[in-house]
Amino acid sequence: MTNVGYRQSGVKIRLRLICTELYTGPQSTDGNRQLEDFRRHKGGSVPNVLGTADVAVLLVDRFDGNLAGIAYLDAPRLTVGAVKNHGYSSFYTFGHEVSHLLGAHHDRRTLNGRRPAYEYGVGNLIPGTRKHTIMA
């Protein structure tokens, strides 16, 4: 489903599952705390967490508040994130957070006048509709 979201948003990447693994590290409902704990998992080394993958995403049962996912943005050596496993919509949240790991921002309104790292790395609101791309 994540690849469907990418395709519908015009994102020209596709994800492929490399492996799954049971996370045995600390668990927190605070998104920032969980992200840091996951990053430090396996001896505190992101390369150890990634193995041969480009990104690693932890699926969690719940976060505090309305948080659905969290990931680093524009941090090439920190390509890990966490997503709340909440059924069908978590596939789109998963793709959204992976896009952050690859350098994509939300839509231009959220940049507050700053330039994105990549001109194509922003979501879009589709004028005249209530539709948007996976990052907006």
Image: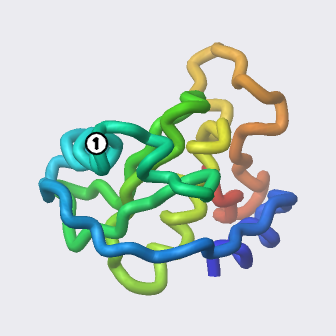
Image quadrant holding the N terminus, namely bottom right
Residue 51: give x, y in percent of width and height: 53, 55
Residue at 16% across / 48% down in the picture? 30
- Front residue of this view, candidates 52 and 83: 52
127 relative to 114 in the view: left or right: right
Residue at 77% across / 63% down in the picture? 9
Residue 3: give x, y in percent of width and height: 72, 74
Residue where numbered disc 1 is placed? 43
Q: How many marks?
A: 1
Residue 47: give x, y in percent of width and height: 50, 43
Q: Quadrant of residue 7?
A: bottom right
Is the residue 4 above or below the residue 68 in the image? below
Amino acid type shown at disc 1: Gly
**Crowd around label 1: few <14 · some 14–19 · many ≥20 (10 Å):** few
Residue 90: give x, y in percent of width and height: 45, 74
Residue at 83% across / 37% down in the picture? 120
